Amino acid sequence: GIKPPGGSADDSLYSDSNVCLQLSVAGAVLVASKKQASEFQQHVKGRVYVVDAYGIAEKIIGKPLVNTAMLGAFAKVTGVITLENLEKAFAAKFPPEVAKKNAEAARACFEQVRV
């Protein structure tokens, strides 16, 4: 979770042509960033989804730990898992207060992810 100067760790992926140019038109990229999706779209053939997971995690969890927060955005974008199932997984893995904060961060990313 260390953020490089000028952006989030995920920001650096869009400029890596090996990552983005290999993506098919039917593919998608989920980026943790404060930037707009349009700023990444020129580098990606598929769809770009963006969410400020670092800001959300910092506000809710108190640290810029985005793994569980990004799962909420992943749930929204893909539909392969529900928020309810994420919350159950957090409850099974973490102490109650930690699970609650991770669930809140995941829900916020679910609600705020944008194209």
Image (tube, rainbow, N blue to C red):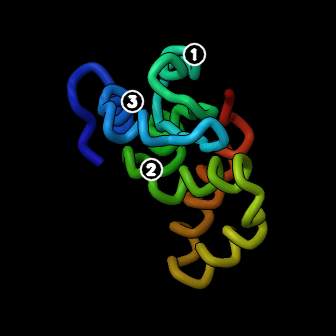
Tell me which residue sits at (45%, 23%) in the image. 43
The one of 1 and 102 positioned closer to us in this rendering: 1
Q: Residue 1: x percent and y percent?
A: 30, 48
Of circles 1 and 2, the one toward us is 1
Disc on res. 38? 1
- 92 relative position to 8: left or right: right
Label 1–label 3 contact, CB within 8 A: no
| Secondary structure under the numbered disc 1 in the rendered image | helix
Label 2–label 3 contact, CB within 8 A: no
Tell me which residue sits at (62%, 64%) in the image. 100
Q: Quadrant of residue 99?
A: bottom right
Q: Mark 2 points at which residue?
A: 66
Tell me which residue sits at (77%, 57%) in the image. 79
| Secondary structure under the numbered disc 3 in the rendered image | helix
- 72 relative position to 42: left or right: right
Structural crowding at the residue carrying mark 2, measured as other residues with C-alpha within 10 Å and reported as few (<14), some (14–19) or many (≥20):
many
Structural crowding at the residue carrying mark 3, measured as other residues with C-alpha within 10 Å and reported as few (<14), some (14–19) or many (≥20):
many
- 36 relative position to 110: left or right: left
Of mark 1 and mark 3, the one earlier in the sequence is 3
Query: How far apart are the alpha carbons under marks 1 and 2?
Result: 22 Å
Q: Identify which amino acid the numbered label 2 is placed on.
A: Val
Of mark 2 and mark 3, the one earlier in the sequence is 3
Q: Identify which amino acid the numbered label 1 is placed on.
A: Ser
Q: Please tell me whether residue 87 is drawn above or below residue 43 in the rendered image.
A: below
Q: Residue 4: x percent and y percent?
A: 22, 31
- 59 relative position to 92: left or right: left
Question: Looking at the image, can residue 49 be seen?
Answer: no
Query: How far apart are the alpha carbons under marks 1 and 3?
Result: 12 Å
Q: Identify which amino acid the numbered label 3 is placed on.
A: Tyr
The one of 17 and 84 positioned closer to us in this rendering: 17
